[in-house]
Image (cartoon, rainbow, N blue to C red):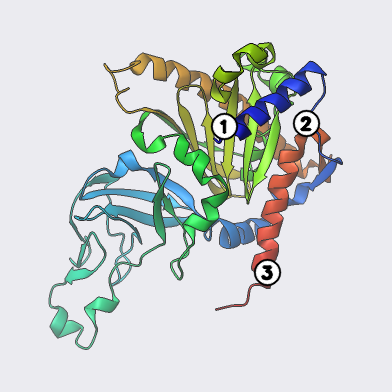
């Protein structure tokens, strides 16, 4: 983070804490309940947002070295990530071009070629079809060059392999992440490794889960037995950076900083930062590590989550701070997020009750409104986009 921006944000939050005031938007906002329930709306979100915009499909440590591959789902699409002999990353639909069989069953591994388990069609890990039994006899006139694996837009940045799920087009990854690229680069996530992780499926709409992570109004109540006492009461700030958000959640120690120590002020020592990389990737930046939260919306009321603690390389078991340190931190994070998830599931269960036709976002919950506005902007853009 730019040093001037860092100091400006700290000054802003210290001033708010000193005057017992809040970071406020201009007005109270409303969020229609139907947008969390409607099947048609969910389908539009998946097609217009999820499958068009980048998802952090893997950390680079999961695709390390030539021949590495990883099988994953990206917003309902079966995806195969590979790294070729030259070190370039690729993303393909994990589907044979002959009759559609799943090409790779293994979750991960190392291979330079993949052979379909159905009829033996073989592909290089860079995509081309390199062999098929009796091809000339059975498929005369078909050009092998035109039936390689179906590629998806892919990009490596900030320690992740990003995939956009539209096989029909490219994607300007650099432009999309430009508003916060320097801040993400500075986190050094490419030099980290996955020290601990959990996966779970939640019975809640994906937007409810995002909303629960970008305000601190609930901390002293929902997290009173975990992290609540360590954070300022209902004090946070946010900035929209293009379609993305940076939220700052100060811990109680920030208010005690003195001007004489200003040169040593460091945001991560006194606050958590949450980067919401639109639409479904979040990074919880803590003092010495980063928690990567990857969402896969499955249905209006069902969301798959992957939560991985990224620690500096050299922090594997027996090295650096050691596995126990990261496991303890990961356990605290998981316990806190489970509190959010339990509430989110309760909210979703009551959506259809008729108690509310809309939710209220208070003036100190402006990040939630900004996030939902961004969702609507992308849906509106898709609605006016001319078919190719």
Q: Is residue 218 visible?
A: no
Decide: is 323 above or below 29. Answer: above
Foreground mark, 1 or 2, reads 1
| Tags 1 and 2 touching, CB below 8 Å | no
State the mark number for residue 23: 2
Name the foreground residue: 363 vs 293: 363
Side of 4 where 184 appears, left or right: left
Question: Residue at image x 32%, y 53%?
Answer: 81
| Tags 1 and 3 touching, CB below 8 Å | no
Question: To which residue does mark 3 refer?
Answer: 383
Name the foreground residue: 193 vs 346: 193
State the mark number for residue 191: none
**Res. 349 image quadrant:** top right
Decide: is 198 above or below 19. Answer: below
**Among numbered discs 1 and 3, the one appearing first in the sequence:** 1
**Res. 91 image quadrant:** bottom left
Side of 338 where 354 appears, left or right: right
Question: To which residue does mark 1 refer?
Answer: 3
**Among numbered discs 2 and 3, the one appearing first in the sequence:** 2
Horizontal and vertical percent position of residue 237: 70, 32
Decide: is 326 above or below 376. Answer: above
Badge 3 marks a residue whose secondary structure is helix
Horizontal and vertical percent position of residue 8: 67, 30
Q: Residues within 10 Å of mark 3 (few under 14, many from 20)?
A: few
Badge 1 marks a residue whose secondary structure is helix
Q: Residues within 10 Å of mark 1 (few under 14, many from 20)?
A: few
Side of 380 where 264 appears, left or right: left
Side of 59 where 47 appears, left or right: right
């Amino acid at each position: 983070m730019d040093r001037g921006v860092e100091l400006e944000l700290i000054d802003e939050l210290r001033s708010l804490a000193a005057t017992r005031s809040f970071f406020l938007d201009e007005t109270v906002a409303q969020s229609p309940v139907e947008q969390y329930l409607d099947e048609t709306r969910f389908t539009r979100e998946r097609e217009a947002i999820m499958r068009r915009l980048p998802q952090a499909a893997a950390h680079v440590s999961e695709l390390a070295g030539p021949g590495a591959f990883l099988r994953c789902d990206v917003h309902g699409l079966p995806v195969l990530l590979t790294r070729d002999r030259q070190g370039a990353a690729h993303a393909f639909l994990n589907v044979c071009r002959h009759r559609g069989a799943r090409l790779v069953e293994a979750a991960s591994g190392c291979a330079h070629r993949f052979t379909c388990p159905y009829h033996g069609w073989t592909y290089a890990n860079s995509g081309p079809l390199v062999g098929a039994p009796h091809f000339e006899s059975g498929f005369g006139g078909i050009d092998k060059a035109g039936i390689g694996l179906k590629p998806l837009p892919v990009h490596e940045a900030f320690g992740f392999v990003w995939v956009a799920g539209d096989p029909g087009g490219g994607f300007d990854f650099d432009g999309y992440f430009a508003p916060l690229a320097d801040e993400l680069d500075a986190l050094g996530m490419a030099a980290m490794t996955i020290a601990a992780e959990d996966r779970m499926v939640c019975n809640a709409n994906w937007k409810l889960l995002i909303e629960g992570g970008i305000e601190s109004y609930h901390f002293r109540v929902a997290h009173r037995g975990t992290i609540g006492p360590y954070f300022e009461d209902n004090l946070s700030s946010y900035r929209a950076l293009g379609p993305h958000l940076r939220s700052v959640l100060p811990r109680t120690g920030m208010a005690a900083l003195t001007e004489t120590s200003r040169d040593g002020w460091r945001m991560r020592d006194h606050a958590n930062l949450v980067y919401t990389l639109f639409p479904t990737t979040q990074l919880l930046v803590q003092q010495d590590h980063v928690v990567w939260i990857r969402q896969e919306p499955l249905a209006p009321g069902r969301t798959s989550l992957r939560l991985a603690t990224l620690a500096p390389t050299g922090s594997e078991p027996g090295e650096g701070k050691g596995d126990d340190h990261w496991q303890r931190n990961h356990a605290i994070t998981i316990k806190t997020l489970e509190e959010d998830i339990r509430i989110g599931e309760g909210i979703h269960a009551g959506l259809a009750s008729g108690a509310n036709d809309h939710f209220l976002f208070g003036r100190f919950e402006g990040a939630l409104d900004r996030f939902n506005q961004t969702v609507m902007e992308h849906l509106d853009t898709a609605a006016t986009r001319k078919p190719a």
